[in-house]
Image: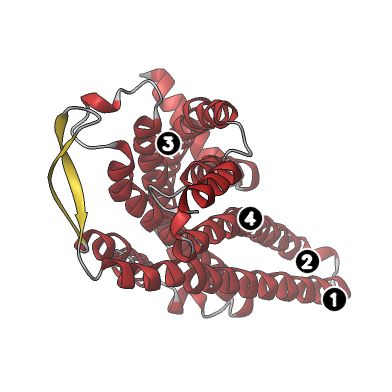
């Protein structure tokens, strides 16, 4: 009876042809995600240098720099994950098995993902203050305050890396299939109970909190900007063109943040759903009968994340005249050298 039950479960796993799964994984990991990731790494480095050249007179550039750093961290960990998933990398030649190596890298990647969400929410909040309290925003959100807030986000969320790694330890184990000894990850006795809570918090609380913050700040921005535009239209006169130009800059800044927030939310929801499934169903975890399906879904998620982390520099270039100006100056400076 147990054998028949195992066979029926195996058939459910094999609904998708294993060869097709390997082809999709190869295309997503070794071609699309890697190419997009390399472009994104270059773009985020350029963004960091661009914001540094612009200077940090207010908190906006500080927050955007923090966002570029977190996106850069995500893309770098993506590259490590891609190398582990590389089908041409012989597992028998490694010190540790690939699935166990992923345990350490994925938590670091998840840390940068959560940081990106909260930093994006911080940027939306800053822009919210610019629209709601235009005369007091420079007193409230100073460069020092923005620096402290963004550093605090990085420090507070470091628990994403510390907690899971504190529940495992590395030893050695002889594996007959490979006829050699590997560095092997062992779990502490309380890991399962702690990680079940961790998965629920990671998949439900923090993602929903981030989405709620982004949606609330974006709605406030759009609503306030619309009311300001209607007021300016009623009192407009030939001498108010300067105000209209300010309104145009506000529109670009808000459109930029709304686009970034929307892309992040679209990429966050599927990832949270997969994390929730990992927490609720043992079959989805490493060694489970649905782990191949897990890898297939994850290959698309990591592709979407790479797009999300890589597209911000293009959004800055498209919607920020100051970013374009500094970008051209940097390019001309490099060309002269």
Residue labelled with disc 3: 41
- Which tag, 2 or 4, sits closer to the chain's start? 2
Q: CA distance from mark 4 to mark 1?
A: 39 Å
- Tag 4 secondary structure: helix
Q: Are marks 3 and 4 in contact (CB under 8 Å)?
A: no
In this image, 271 relative to 97: left or right? right
Where is residue 3? Give x, y as percent.
47, 48
- Location of mark 1 (residue): 235
| Closer to us: 268 or 204 | 204
Q: How many marks?
A: 4
Identify the residue position indicated by label 2 in the image. Answer: 240
Q: Quadrant of residue 53?
A: top left
Q: Residue at (36%, 30%) from the top-left corner?
A: 83
* Label 2 vs 3, first from the N-terminus: 3
> Label 3 to label 1, Cα distance in Å?
46 Å
To which residue does mark 4 refer?
266
Q: Nearer the viewer, residue 57 or 108?
A: 108
Verify CB contact (< 8 Å) between mark 2 and mark 1.
yes
Where 228 sits versus 112, above or below? below
- Badge 4 vs badge 1, beta-carbon distance below 8 Å: no
Q: CA distance from mark 2 to mark 4?
A: 39 Å
Q: Earlier in the sequence, mark 2 or mark 1?
A: 1
**The residue tagged with tag 3: helix, strand or loop?**
helix
Ranked by sequence position, the earlier of labels 3 and 4 is 3
Mark 4 or 1: the one toward you: 4
């Amino acid at each position: 009876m147990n054998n028949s039950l195992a066979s029926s479960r195996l058939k459910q796993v094999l609904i998708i042809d294993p060869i097709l799964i390997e082809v999709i994984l190869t295309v997503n990991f070794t071609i699309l995600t890697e190419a997009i990731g390399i472009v994104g790494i270059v773009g985020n480095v350029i963004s960091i240098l661009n914001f540094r050249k612009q200077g940090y007179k207010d908190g906006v550039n500080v927050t955007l720099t923090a966002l570029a750093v977190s996106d850069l961290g995500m893309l770098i960990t993506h590259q490590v994950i891609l190398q582990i998933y590389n089908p041409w990398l012989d597992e028998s030649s490694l010190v540790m098995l690939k699935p166990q190596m992923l345990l350490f890298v994925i938590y670091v990647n998840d840390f940068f993902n959560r940081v990106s969400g909260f930093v994006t929410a911080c940027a939306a909040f800053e822009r919210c203050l610019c629209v709601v309290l235009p005369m007091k925003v420079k007193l409230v959100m100073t460069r020092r305050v923005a620096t402290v807030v963004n550093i605090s986000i990085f420090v507070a969320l470091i628990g994403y890396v510390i907690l899971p790694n504190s529940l495992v330890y590395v030893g050695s184990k002889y594996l007959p299939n490979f006829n050699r000894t590997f560095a092997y990850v062992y779990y502490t006795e309380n890991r399962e109970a702690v990680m079940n809570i961790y998965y629920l918090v990671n998949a439900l609380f923090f993602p929903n909190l981030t989405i709620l913050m982004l949606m609330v700040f974006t709605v406030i921005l759009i609503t306030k900007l619309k009311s300001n535009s209607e007021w300016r239209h009623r009192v407009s006169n030939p001498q108010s063109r300067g105000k209209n130009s300010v309104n145009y800059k506000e529109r670009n800044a808000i459109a930029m943040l709304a686009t970034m927030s929307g892309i992040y939310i679209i990429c966050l929801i599927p990832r949270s759903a997969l994390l929730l499934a990992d927490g609720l169903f043992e079959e989805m975890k490493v060694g489970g009968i649905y782990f191949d399906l897990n890898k297939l879904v994850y290959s698309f998620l990591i592709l979407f994340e790479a797009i999300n982390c890589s597209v911000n520099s293009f959004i800055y270039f498209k919607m920020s005249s100051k970013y374009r100006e500094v970008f051209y100056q940097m390019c001309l400076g490099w060309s002269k050298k």
